[in-house]
Amino acid sequence: MKITDIKFERLKVKLEKPFVVAIGVMEYAETIIVEITTDEGITGYGEASPFSPVTGETLDSVPVFLELFKKALIGLSPFEIEKIHKIMGAMTVGNTSAKAGIDIALYDIMAKKLEMPLYKFLGGYRSEFSIDMTVGIGKPEVMAEDAMAYVREGFHILKVKAGIDPKADIEAMRLIRQKVGPKIRIRVDANQGWSVNDAIRVIEAYEEYDVEAVEQPVRCWDIDGLAYIRSHIAISLMADESLHSPEDAFKLAKRQAVDEFNIKLMKAGGIYPSLRINAIGEAAGIPCMLGCMLETRIGNAASAAFVASQKNVTEADLDSFRHFEDKSISGGFDVENGVMKLLEKPGLGITVVV
């Protein structure tokens, strides 16, 4: 089986409401759908969802590199996945969401060829798991109402954004815990927004509200800061923006800087390098979570397959598809009462209507 063509199309969808995090305000989901065809008539779908503060890419830059990859990859087998990543890596540093778009489509093809759901092709550890819902930054009382709305829908894990104002972050957590009660699991993501001292102060305050983990409190380059914070807090510490590659995973593990890894396919360059990151985490005793950018069901389905396939992936933050409506893409999974269930269909299980 050989790759015969690679096509890609921009998709820009307005969010139901602006989504505020410490590193910016997002009003649109801007992504690129990748379609790879083969000489055996099997088509695979992928997604490149750039976010310049994290991946350094934009909706304009990604197609440039997809076009370069297209010229280099036509004629190769989708199963030559390590070779393909070596080729893409030699062509450009970074540009990980563009690489992920190619990678996901290739895995979709491989699993379809074997007539297997992708999660079984990757390992098949489970077929369903709980996901969280993300509460964006706003007025503390509004954040508490948003959190409660998700709980009423049946979700039992919340991920609360923070990192702009430490005092407001603490107040928001107080109101959220008061509103949702003691049984709801709560995690926090500061998106690099705090200083080391503020991080320790806020995280210590969070102990009263039974917060179970805090994600990326300081700048992505500050590994020493992460390690220092970890040595001064009782709550689990997670790396996100500090973790892009297997090499980053090795450095974080060696430095004993964090307790958990947040893997994102768009940061890592797809499923293949993410498997290597997870393997390093597992060897170091560091459990992983799969997170997402503002991706459609394609990207979320690929991440869901990864979560379902790997024992060491214990958490899932895969709610981006809920922030906007795109009727052209369906399938992949169902979500009921906070549980994501993979469909027993070949590949990603996604249907794309052109």
Image: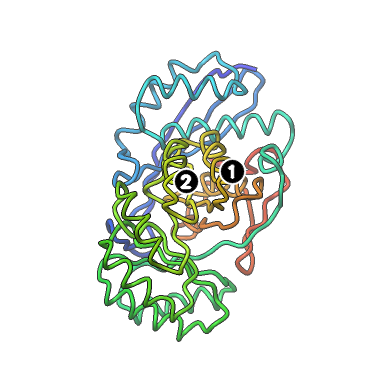
Left or right side of 34 for 38: right
Front-most of 266 and 204?
A: 204
Helix or strand or loop: what does disc 2 sit on? Answer: helix
Query: Quarter of the image containing the N terminus?
Result: top right
Residue 283's tag is: 1
Name the residue: 33% across, 77% down.
170
Left or right side of 282 for 261: left
Name the residue: 60% across, 56% down.
314
**Gap between marks 2 and 1 measured at Cα:** 9 Å
Label pair 2/1, CB-CB below 8 angstroms: yes
Q: Amino acid at mark 2?
A: Ala
Residue 253's tag is: 2
Name the residue: 34% across, 67% down.
162
Q: Give the x, y percent position of residue 77.
A: 60, 18
Q: Give the x, y percent position of residue 223.
A: 34, 49
Q: Amino acid at mark 1?
A: Ala
Front-most of 238 and 179?
A: 238
Q: Residues within 10 Å of mark 2 (few under 14, many from 20)?
A: many
Looking at this view, name the residue that lies furthest to the top. 75
Q: Give the x, y percent position of residue 73.
A: 49, 18
